[in-house]
C-alpha cells in the first residue's frame, strides 16, 4: 500500500487520480509545508484526516481545540490579524452558526472598519452532511446566510481538482474565505494536478458539461443528482450545459450569462432551502441583466422551506432528485 | 463633548472619563511591540498605547484623516503601527481576538504580550468563558483586564452576576485572578507588570479586575441617565473622592513634585488636544466614491 508521503510526492506537471477528500488534504499538507504561518485549528483535527498531519508538522501547527466554536474561530481570526494564516476547521456546516458572530462581526468587517490597516487571511472550512439521517441539526447547507455578508469570499468546490485548487487559493488569499464541502463529494474521484502551484481563482465558475438546449447551474452538492439527470437526458436527446459556480461569493454572473446567451433556458438546482438561496440570487441577477436572452421563465429546484427530516422515508425526496431535474428540464423545452 | 453637542461627532460616544488610571496604568506596563484590544469605550486606551491624538480625533468625526479613514468611528479605534489591533463594539467580541493575537505570538515564538480590555458586562459572554479556558490550557501570553465600572449600561453587577467577585472566576479556568484599585494608577501598573512578567516566561494568562467608575452617562445620546439606574449622589461621590486624576496629582505632590511642573504638563496636554481638534476639523470628509475601499486585500476574479 502507498503511504501518504508517496501518494503526495508525484512529479509536478502530471495528474493523479484521487478522491475529493484526499485532494483537500493534499492541498492543506502542501500549503502547510510551503508556508509555516499556516496552522490548522479545530476539534479533533489532530487525529482524523487520513494524512498524519501531526507527525509531519508537529503540535505547534496542528491545534486540537476544546468544543468552543465561537471562540476558537475568533482565536483563528485574532491569529490571522497578528501574523498567522490559520485554517479553522468547523467540521459540520451547522456549527457555523455558533461561530457566525466572529465570522460576520469580526472577520468580514475588520479590514474595512480599520481603514485597511489589518488583513485577515483566515480560512474557515466546514463540511455539509445533507443526507444520511443526520436530522435537522447536522444537515444544514448554511452558505446562503453568509452570502449576504459583504467582505467574505465563499467557495463550494465539487470536484477533486477543484477542491485542491480552490483550497490552495483560499489559503494564499489575504481575506477571509469560507469553504463549504459536501460529504457526498468526499469519495468522488478525479484527476488532480500534482503541480504544487495548481490554483483555481476564486470567483470563476466552470462548465462541467457543454450543451446547447438548457443552462443548468448546479450549486455545491446538487452536482451529483444533476450529473445523473444530465446523462439520462442526453439519451433522450436533450443537451444540457452544466455550470458549477464553484465560488458562491462573488458569483460569476458573466459565465452564467454567456451560457444563457447560447441556450435561452435556465434551470438552477440548489440543495439549500428555497427562500433566499443561491438560486434566488442568480435568478434575480439574470432577470435584471439577461432577461432578453431568456426564452422561458427561469426554473429553480431547491429543498423545501421545511427542516431536514430524520426518517429515510421522508429524507429520500427532500432534495432535488434526478427525476425532478429531468422533469423540470423537459418542461423548459 | 462640546464637539459632540455641536454635531461634529456622529453616532454614539462612550467616554472613559473616570477610568483613566485603569487604562493608563495597564498600558504603561506593556511595550511598543505588545498588542492591545479594546471595546466600545476604549477611547483613552489608544492614547495610553501611543496612538497619535490627531488621527484619533479625526476618526471620531468620521474624517478621511481619521486613524481608520472614517470607517470605524469612536467604538472602533485601531492603530496597528503601535499594536492596537482592534476594538469591538460587540460586547465580549474582542476577547477571542486578543486570545488569537497571543496564540499567534506563541506559535511564531515571538516575545509579545496581548493586553485585552473589556467591561464587567462582557464577563457574562460565552466568549469570556471559552477564551479564558483556551488561554489557560495553552499558557498564552495574554492579560485579561476587566474594567469593572459596576454597570453594564443600566444593569448593575448585583443584577447580572451570580458571582459578583469577578476575579473569583479565574481559578475556575486555572489562572490567577486579582482585584486592584482601578483609580490608583500605580496599583494597576504594578499588577499588570507582574502579570506581564508571568506571561513572558511562559506561565500563561492572568485575569485582573480593576475597580473603577464611569463618570459620564453610558453614552452620549443614549440618555440612560433619566432611567435612574444609579443615584446622582453616587456619581458625585465618585467624582469627588475617586477621581483618578486628582488622586494621582495628590500623590505626586506628596512625593515632592512641584505644582508648577504639573501645571506645565496639564497645559501641554490641553495644547495637544486643541491641536488635535484643529487637525480633525480641518481634515476632509471621505469622498463618496471611496466607499468600497478597504473591503478586500486580494483582488477578486469574479
Ligand atoms: C453583544 C452585545 N450586546 C449588547 C450590546 C449593547 N451594549 C453596548 S455597551 C453595553 C454594556 C456593556 O457593559 P460593560 O461590558 O460593563 O462595558 P461598559 O460599557 O461598562 O464599559 C451593552 C449592553 C452590544 N453592544 N453588544
Ligand atoms: Mg461596565
Image (cartoon, rainbow, N blue to C red):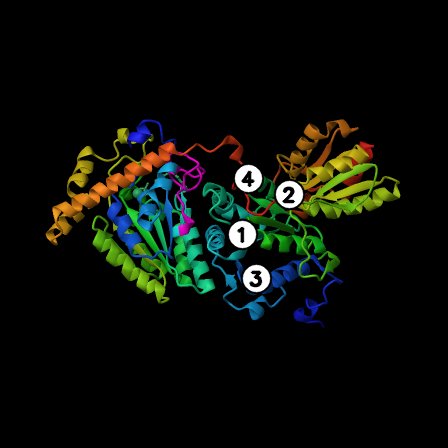
**Alpha carbons under labels 1 and 3: distance apart:** 13 Å
Instruction: Mark 4: give few (<14), some (14-19) or many (20+) Cα within 10 Å.
Output: some
Q: In which quarter of the image is residue B10?
A: top left
**Alpha carbons under labels 3 and 2: distance apart:** 27 Å
Q: Is residue A262 above or below residue A15?
A: above
Q: Nearer the viewer, residue B131 or B270?
A: B270
| Disc 1: which residue | A121
Tell me which segment is drawn in magenta. Answer: B59-81
**Alpha carbons under labels 1 and 4: distance apart:** 16 Å
| Disc 4: which residue | A150
Ligand 1 in which quarter: top left
Chain letter of mark 3 equals A
Indicate which disc residue A35 carries. 3
Q: Position of residue A84 (x, y in %)?
A: 50, 57
Q: Residue at x 47, y 58 (%)?
A: A66
Q: Main secondary structure of the magenta part?
A: loop
Q: In this view, does B200 lie above or below A271?
A: below
Amino acid at each position: 500500500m502507498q503511504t501518504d508521503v508517496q501518494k503526495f510526492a508525484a512529479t509536478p506537471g502530471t495528474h493523479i487520480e484521487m478522491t475529493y477528500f484526499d485532494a483537500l488534504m493534499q492541498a492543506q499538507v502542501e500549503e502547510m509545508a510551503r508556508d509555516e504561518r499556516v496552522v490548522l485549528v479545530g476539534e479533533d483535527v489532530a487525529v482524523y484526516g487520513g494524512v498524519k498531519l501531526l507527525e509531519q508538522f508537529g503540535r505547534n501547527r496542528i491545534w486540537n481545540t476544546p468544543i468552543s466554536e465561537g471562540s476558537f474561530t475568533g482565536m483563528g481570526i485574532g491569529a490571522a490579524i497578528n501574523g498567522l494564516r490559520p485554517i479553522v476547521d468547523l467540521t459540520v456546516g451547522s456549527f457555523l452558526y455558533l461561530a457566525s458572530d466572529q465570522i460576520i462581526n469580526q472577520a468580514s468587517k475588520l479590514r474595512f472598519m480599520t481603514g485597511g490597516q489589518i488583513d485577515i487571511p483566515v480560512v474557515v472550512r466546514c463540511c455539509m452532511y445533507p443526507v444520511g439521517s443526520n436530522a435537522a441539526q447536522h444537515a444544514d447547507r448554511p452558505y446562503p446566510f453568509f452570502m449576504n455578508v459583504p467582505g467574505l469570499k465563499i467557495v463550494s468546490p465539487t470536484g477533486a481538482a477543484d477542491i485542491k485548487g480552490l483550497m490552495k487559493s483560499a489559503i494564499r488569499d489575504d481575506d477571509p474565505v469560507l469553504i463549504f464541502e459536501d460529504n457526498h463529494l468526499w469519495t468522488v474521484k478525479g484527476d488532480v494536478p500534482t503541480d504544487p502551484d495548481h490554483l483555481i481563482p476564486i470567483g470563476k465558475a466552470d462548465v462541467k458539461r457543454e450543451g446547447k438546449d438548457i443552462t443548468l447551474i448546479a450549486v455545491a452538492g446538487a452536482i451529483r443528482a444533476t450529473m445523473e439527470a444530465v446523462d439520462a437526458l442526453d439519451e433522450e436527446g436533450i443537451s444540457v450545459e452544466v455550470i458549477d459556480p464553484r465560488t458562491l461569493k462573488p458569483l460569476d454572473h458573466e459565465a452564467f450569462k454567456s451560457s444563457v446567451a447560447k441556450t435561452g433556458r435556465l434551470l438552477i438546482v440548489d440543495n439549500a432551502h428555497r427562500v433566499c438561496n443561491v438560486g434566488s440570487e442568480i435568478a434575480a441577477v439574470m432577470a435584471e441583466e439577461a432577461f432578453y436572452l431568456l426564452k422561458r421563465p427561469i426554473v429553480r429546484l431547491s429543498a423545501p422551506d421545511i427542516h431536514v427530516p430524520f426518517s429515510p422515508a421522508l429524507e429520500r425526496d427532500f432534495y432535488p432528485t434526478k427525476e425532478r431535474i429531468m422533469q423540470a428540464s423537459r418542461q423548459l423545452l | 463633548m462640546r464637539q459632540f453637542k455641536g454635531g461634529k461627532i456622529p453616532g454614539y460616544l462612550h467616554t472613559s472619563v473616570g477610568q483613566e488610571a485603569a487604562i493608563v496604568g495597564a498600558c504603561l506596563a506593556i511595550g511598543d511591540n505588545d498588542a492591545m484590544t479594546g471595546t466600545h469605550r476604549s477611547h483613552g486606551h489608544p492614547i495610553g498605547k501611543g496612538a497619535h491624538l490627531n488621527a484619533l480625533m479625526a476618526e471620531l468625526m468620521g474624517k478621511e484623516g481619521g486613524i481608520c479613514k472614517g470607517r470605524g468611528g469612536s467604538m472602533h479605534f485601531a492603530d496597528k503601527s503601535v499594536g492596537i489591533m482592534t476594538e469591538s463594539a460587540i460586547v465580549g467580541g474582542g476577547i477571542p481576538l486578543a486570545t488569537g493575537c497571543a496564540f499567534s505570538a506563541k506559535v511564531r515564538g515571538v516575545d509579545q504580550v496581548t493586553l485585552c480590555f473589556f467591561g464587567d458586562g462582557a464577563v457574562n459572554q460565552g466568549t469570556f468563558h471559552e477564551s479564558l479556558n483556551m488561554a489557560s490550557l495553552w499558557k498564552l501570553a495574554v492579560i485579561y483586564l476587566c474594567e469593572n465600572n459596576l454597570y453594564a449600561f443600566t444593569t448593575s453587577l448585583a443584577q447580572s452576576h451570580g458571582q459578583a467577585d469577578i476575579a473569583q472566576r479565574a481559578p475556575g479556568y486555572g489562572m490567577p485572578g486579582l482585584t486592584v484599585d482601578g483609580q490608583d494608577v500605580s496599583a494597576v501598573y504594578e499588577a499588570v507588570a507582574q502579570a506581564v512578567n508571568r506571561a513572558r516566561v511562559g506561565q500563561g494568562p492572568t485575569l485582573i479586575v480593576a475597580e473603577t467608575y464611569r463618570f459620564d452617562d453610558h453614552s452620549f445620546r443614549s440618555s440612560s441617565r433619566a432611567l435612574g439606574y444609579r443615584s446622582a449622589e453616587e456619581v458625585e461621590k465618585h467624582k469627588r473622592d475617586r477621581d483618578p486624576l486628582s488622586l494621582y496629582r495628590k500623590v505626586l505632590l506628596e512625593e515632592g513634585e512641584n505644582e508648577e511642573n504639573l501645571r506645565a504638563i496639564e497645559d501641554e496636554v490641553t495644547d495637544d488636544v486643541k491641536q488635535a481638534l484643529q487637525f480633525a476639523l480641518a481634515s476632509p470628509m471621505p469622498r463618496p466614491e471611496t466607499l468600497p475601499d478597504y473591503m478586500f486585500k486580494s483582488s477578486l476574479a469574479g
